[in-house]
Structure formats: structure tokens, C-alpha cells
Image: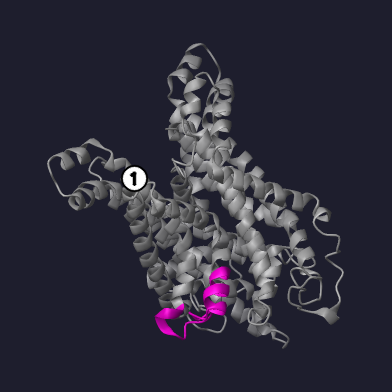
Amino acid sequence: MTRYIIRRLLQFVPVILISTLIVYALVFAMPGDPIRALAGDRPMSDAVRETLREQYNLDDPFFVQYAKYLWGIISAGDFGTTFNGRPVSDLIAQRLPVTATLALVTFVIQTIMGIIAGILAALYRDRFFDRFVQVATVTMVALPTLVIAFLMQLVFGLNLGLFPIAGINDGLISYILPALAMASVSTGILARLVRSELLDSLTSDYVRTATAKGMKRTRVVTRHGLRNSLIPAVTFIGADLASMMAGSIVVEAIFNLPGLGEQVYRSIQAQEGTVVVGIVTLFVIFFVLINLIVDILYGLLDPRIRYE
Amino acid sequence: MSEMHKAEARTAPIDSQLETSGKSEQKTEEASLLADAWRSLRRNPWFIVSAVLLLIFLTMAVFPQLFTNTDPRECLLSRSRQDPSGEFWFGTDVQGCDYYSRVIHGARNSIAIGFIVAIGTFIVAVLLGLVAGYSGGWVDALISRITDMVFAVPYILGALVLLNALQAFQAQGVREVSFVLIIFMWPTMTRLMRGSVISVVNSDFVMAARALGAGPITIMRRHILPNSLGPVIGYATVFTGIIIGAEAVLTFLGVGLQLPAISWGLQLSDARQYLQTSPHLLLFPVIFVGLTVFAFMTMGDAVRDALDPKSKK
């Protein structure tokens, strides 16, 4: 197991290096002079410009710039500074809680709703609730987050006035609509996944044996049926959590949440490369790490899977 | 959310009951895979619903004149932001243009981008997946690692950055947006194709073909390709829906299509400022994007279930 984890971690090094390099290249190969953009309309003396260019390593060859940047992160956790002189790590620290809260609320909503809906649909197969879940999940999976987010905003925010439609000034309640929008697609997939897995295991021999022994229905379902059918759900939930960071861009933009996603979007427009690369690097590392954890967890849950 | 896991999760049958009852299959035992698929599709209500919707939206994209006679670019500032009425079914937008006509004309760009990207990605994915899955060894390792690297960059982020960079050169059109989306979105389908190829590459019929002296190209073309395309075709349809959603997002964020293009994404981003006073400006494009994406995704799911011999019960 330890050897497997070490090998996976080693494999991730090039993946992280090159995918951040791709983003770094896209950002810093952008045409235009960021220093001139910084100066705006005011004239800037050549000496100042040279100093600034040196300070941000803009005169080095591209790969040297990238290496210096990476070294800064590894050696000192230094993600660089914005053009206003503010450390990017500072900015990240300020905005991370918003995105983390959004991700957490989303995670809780989709896990609870998805699993419960899936279990009930499987238990009441072909009854009204099952039909309802099937129609609802197909719709939820097929509607993009953007559409759900706007519909939520229009219906629950504007028409019914139940929830705030923008900002985070109302505390946790202002995260409800964005989280529902973000959770929608995954809740649908999760419910479907749990339903079909549970149906499979409920018709299996070991469940029939347990029932035949006289075990109570609830115990059969929770101990024998569910246990085996939740393994694929765990994998899905993990992988979903990994990509939630990127999904936050759209939702944060629509609901005006001051999180990392919104910051990335803003910094891209302002051509503030260091911020973009810093946050995207964070996203990528997070994505890759969670996927590793999911793979390990998968092995722990399912004894048939062995890692050499 | 990880596209790969979604792709896999979507493989789970939408609804085993609503599908074919199985009685008709027993009558005609020698039906081909396609005839079988068609029979089960015809009985799937989701397929019927999505097919009707797709037909409407495709017609809208190709012949918008069938739906409206009003020129979407004929605007009068004096009638800015009117509510829906008998004269203007969807009201008017900020510039005082007929909103119904603009929303109808928005279908073309979205669906064009959806098809271009889906076809482009399909070609890339099938070629790379076939070569990687069939060759194995270092070729497979190389292709898979490159796929992993691009896959680790969230596509919305990648497209946002690259489109923003391209903006400095020229105004973005359908071509640029499609190109950028292909660059960041090929890995999911490629992985699916590779997995699908690997699952058939060791079959007896492939070995038999090899034993009979067939070359690698013949084996790939005649034996592996037809047997591994099923899941990819279904996913390509779902993927078209994903792309249409992604284009709306990118355009909404300001890096996709630019004015004076007529697009649902642009209408959404304009409408946001008037959310409180004229919510209809947001509502109509949202419904149209939603229904289009819904149609493609549901159609894709239905097609994949029908093409997958294992999902038949």
C-alpha cells in the first residue's frame, strides 16, 4: 500500500508540473505588456519600468521564469505578488473560506439528497416516488449548472424572495441557492448511481440469504445491501469534490460570491497573471490530490481491489 | 465535477422499466445491433421527447425564418425593455429589439459550436484512443500521460485563459471558440475510447483475425472500431450538450462570442444587469439554453443505453 501511494505521488509530479506549465504559458505568453497596463495612462520612466520588469522576472526566458516561480512556491510557499504588491497567498487566504464554504454546503446537500433519494427509489421500486426520482434525476443531470443557477435566482430569489440572490452578507443562508445550483447535476447522478447499485445488491444471493435467516428488513438493507452498493458512490463523490473548485467559477460569478472562482475570472480580465496561475495551481494540486485519496479509499472499502 | 466520472455514471441505465419490455426481442432473435437499438429507442419516452426537441431546435438553427419574420437587428431605442405582450411575445431587449426574434436567432451559433466541437473532438478521441488502446506499451503511456495533463486543467479555466489571450489578436467568432473548446475538452472522450478499445482488444475475434494474418490497420478498422464505438457515440451526443452549456458560460463570462453576434450567452450576460426590473430578459434565453442542452444530453443517454448490449434486460 505504502509503495503504491509513493508511486502514485511520484506519477503526479510530472502531471502537476506540466499542467501548471500549460496554464503558466497561456497566462504569461499573453500579448501585451503587463507593466504598461499597470502604469495606465500615466507616463512611466524607463528606469522604473526596468526595475519592475526585473522584480517580476519578466526579462528572463520563459522557462527560467516558470522555474523561479515554482521554486518560490516549493521553498517558501510564495505564490508571488499582485501588481499592487499584495502577496497572492494573502489574497488566496482571504478568498478561500468563501469557496470552501460553498464547496462544503454543496457537498453536504448533494451527498444527503442523492443517497437518500437513491435508497428510497430503490426500496420503493416502480412506485410513485421511484418514478418521480427517475424523472427528476434525468432532468437535473441534463440541465447545465448555468441554467439551474439562473432559474434558482429567478424563482427562489426574485419571485418568492426566500433567499438572497447575491453576495454573502446574510451568512450561511446566502450559500444555499448557489450550493443547490452547484449540487444539482451531481445529486442526480448520485441518486441514479445509488439506486441502480442498491437494486443490484438487493436481488443478490447474500441479501436473500440474510432475509431467509429472518433478519429484519432494515438491517438487511443497511448492513448487507447498502454497504456494498455505496462503494461506487464514494468514488463519485470524491471525484466530484475534486472538480468542485473549477465549477465554482460560474456559480460565484452568477451569485456574486467573493470566492476564488470569482477572483480567477476577475484576474484573467485584469491580466493579473500571478493571481491566475496561483489559484489555478492550487485548483490543480487539489484536484490531483483528491483523486489520489479517492483511489486509496476505494481500495480500503473494497477488499477485492489490491494495489501492488 | 469530473467529466470522466460523469461519463461513466451516465452509463447507468436511466430507467430500466421505461425501456423496451424485451418481448419483441425474443420474437426476432437474429436482429442486428442497430435494429435492436432502434427498437428499444422507439419505446423510450425520453428518446421521443428529446428527438422532438432536437428537431425543433435544429430547424430553428438552420431556418430561423420559419419561426419569425422579424429582423433581430431591427431595433428602436424608444421601445427599450418592454415586457412580453401580444406584439412582442418575449418583450424587447435593452436596444429595443424584438426579443423573441433574437432568442430564436441565438440557436444557430450555439448549435454550430456544439456540432463543430463534438465532431472535432470525436475525430481526435477516436484516433488517439484507438492507437493508444491497440498499441499499449510506451505509445499508450505517452498518449495517456498527455491526456492526464490536459485533463487536470479544468476546461472552463483553460478556455477562459486561452480565449482571453486570443482576444488581443482578433474578435472571437464561432471558429475561435470551437477551437479553444476542442483543445481543452478532448481528454474525456479519448479516455472513454481508449477504455472501450482495451475492453475488446483481447477478444477472441481479434486474436482470430490476427491469427489469420490480418495487419494492425485492418484489425483496428474492421474489428476493433465497430465494436468499441458504441459508448463513444452516445457520449458524443451528451458531449454536444455539455459544449452548448460551456459556450453559454464562456460567452456569459465575456470571453466567448462578442457583439454584434447574436447568442444566448450574450443575452444572459446583458440581462443580468436588469434582473430586478426585467427578469424576462433572463428567463427566455435560460429556457432555450436549458431545453437545447437537455435534448442533447437525454438523447445521448438514450442512444448509449440502446447501443449497450449489457443494459438490455
Asked if the magenta segment contains residue A152, the reply would be: yes
Give the vertical position of A186 relative to B307 (above or below). below
Q: Residue at x 44, y 40 (%)?
A: B16
Disc 1 marks a residue whose amino acid type is Glu
Where residue B190 appears, as percent x and y from the top left, is 53, 42
Image-based side of B299 in relation to A291, left or right = right
Q: Position of residue A249 (x, y in %)?
A: 53, 68
> Residue visible at 79% across and 70% down?
B86
- Residue A1 appears at what percent x and percent y? 24, 47
Residue A234, quarter of picture: bottom left
Scheme of image coloration: one colour
> What residue would you read off at disc 1?
A197
Question: Along the line of sight, which residue is nearer the eye, A138 or B131?
Answer: A138
Question: Count of labels shown?
Answer: 1
**Residue B306 visible from this viewpoint:** yes
Q: Quadrant of residue B268?
A: bottom right
Residue nearest the observer in this picture, B136 or B48: B48
Residues drawn in magenta: A150-174
Residue at 67% from the left image edge and 84% from the top image edge: A39
Of residues A126 and A287, the one drawn nearer to the viewer in this rendering: A126
- Pointer 1 chain: A
Outermost residue on the bottom side: it is A42
In this orientation, does residue B130 appear?
no
